[in-house]
Every structure is written in C-alpha cells, then in structure tokens.
Image: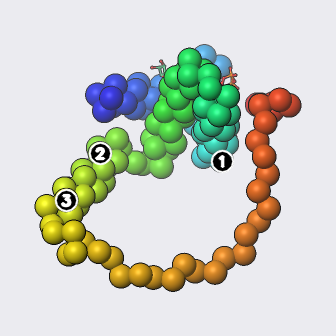
Amino acid sequence: MSDSLERLYQAVLAAKDLDPAVSRTAKLFQRGPAKMAKKLAEEAIEVVIDAVNGNSDAVIRESADLLYNLTVLWASAGVRPADVWREMERREHLLGIAEKLPKSAVKLPKVSAPRVARRPIVALESRGLRKRH
Ligand SMILES: N=c1c2ncn([C@@H]3O[C@H](COP(=O)(O)OP(=O)(O)OP(=O)(O)O)[C@@H](O)[C@H]3O)c2ncn1[C@@H]1O[C@H](COP(=O)(O)O)[C@@H](O)[C@H]1O
C-alpha cells in the first residue's frame, strides 16, 4: 500500500502545475487547501455512510477517492508519505516494546477525563446528502 500511495503522491506532484482545465489535481491546487480539505471530508463521509449501509464495494471505491484526496492535501501541506510512514513506524515500535514488558509495568496512571461541553449528535443519512462542487 505504501508503494502505491508513494506513486500516487508523485503523480499528484507532477500534475499540480498542469492546466486546471484538464487536471483535477491542478484544479484542486488552484482552489487551495480549504477546497482540498472539503473534498477530503466529503469522501470520508461517503466511506462512513457506505460502511454503515454495508456496501463494501462502495467502501472500496470511496476509500480510493479518500486516499487520493488525502494525498493531495499532504502535497499541499508539504507532508511526504515517508513522514507519515515514519510516524506509523514510531508507534509500531512503541507498541512492540510495550508488548514485551510485563503487564503490570505497562499500566498507565488513571487520569480523569477533561470536562468538555458536548454538542448534540446529528445522525448521518445517505438520503439527501448532496455534494457541493
Ligand atoms: N488517483 C486519482 C484519483 N482518485 C480519485 N480521483 C477523482 O476524484 C473523484 C472523486 O471525487 P468526487 O466523487 O467528488 O468526483 P465527482 O463526483 O466527479 O466530483 P468532482 O470532484 O468532479 O467535483 C473521482 O471521480 C476521480 O475522478 C482521482 N483523480 C486523479 N487521480 C490520480 O491523480 C493523478 C493526477 O491526475 P489528474 O488530477 O487528472 O491530473 C493521476 O495519477 C490520477 O490517476
């Protein structure tokens, strides 16, 4: 998966300065990070809705769109896939060490949860969800 995302990242870098009339990526770069973030959020919501509806084929398709839009946002933010892999490896390494420790040694101190004001939960429905361009 990391190879495929690395290739996609390179393709996004190669496309970002093309004519926005012919390249979706160039058009996203022209419109800026706020538009990129909006597209990413829309694709994430589509994945969530398809997963909740049990539509695994759509989850696969929308996940590919989600990864494309994430890659575009990384490129815009100056984040490289290797930066993300490094953070994932760091976490994997930490977990690996924790597994080797005796259980009592990895117990974390109890910290009381911060009190946060909660907003009402809004149900998501696929019905009526329309993309804005
Ligand atoms: N990997 C992708 C990729 N994945 C998804 N998408 C596009 O993103 C769309 C998903 O967004 P939407 O569902 O919002 O699409 P839409 O409903 O047509 O709405 P709009 O995006 O047109 O507003 C898909 O329909 C694809 O057309 C991609 N567009 C480009 N790439 C790659 O990016 C590179 C650069 O391509 P260009 O952007 O075409 O230059 C190439 O390697 C491409 O293969």
**Residue at the spot 86% in from the left edge and 31% down from the top edge:** 128
Q: Amino acid at mark 3?
A: Glu
Do the CB atoms of the residues marked 2 and 1 lie less than 8 Å apart? no
**Residue at the spot 21% in from the left edge and 69% down from the top edge:** 103
Residue 34 x %, y %: 65, 47
In-image side of 131 versus 56 (left or right):
right
In-image side of 105 versus 116 (left or right):
left
Give neighbour class at mark 2: few <14, some 14-19, many 20+ (Cα, 10 Å).
Answer: few
What's the distance in space between the residues labelled 3 and 2, CA to CA?
Answer: 21 Å
Q: Quadrant of the C terminus?
A: top right
What's the distance in space between the residues labelled 3 and 1, CA to CA?
Answer: 40 Å
Pick whichever of labels 2 and 1 is earlier in the sequence.
1
**Residue at the spot 45% in from the left edge and 82% down from the top edge:** 111
Q: Amino acid at mark 1?
A: Ala
Secondary structure found at label 3: helix
Residue 56 x %, y %: 56, 22
Do the CB atoms of the residues marked 3 and 2 lie less than 8 Å apart? no
Give neighbour class at mark 1: few <14, some 14-19, many 20+ (Cα, 10 Å).
Answer: few
Task: Find disc 3 in the rendering and name its residue.
Answer: 99
The quarter of the picture where residue 11 lies is top left
Secondary structure found at label 2: helix
| Residue 85: numbered disc | 2
Do the CB atoms of the residues marked 3 and 1 lie less than 8 Å apart? no
Ligand 1 sits in which quadrant?
Answer: top right
Q: How is the image coloured?
A: rainbow
| Residue 34: numbered disc | 1
Pick whichever of labels 3 and 1 is earlier in the sequence.
1
Residues 110 and 70: in front is 110
**Residue at the spot 46% in from the left edge and 36% down from the top edge:** 71
Camera-nearest label, 3 or 2: 3
The quarter of the picture where residue 108 lies is bottom left
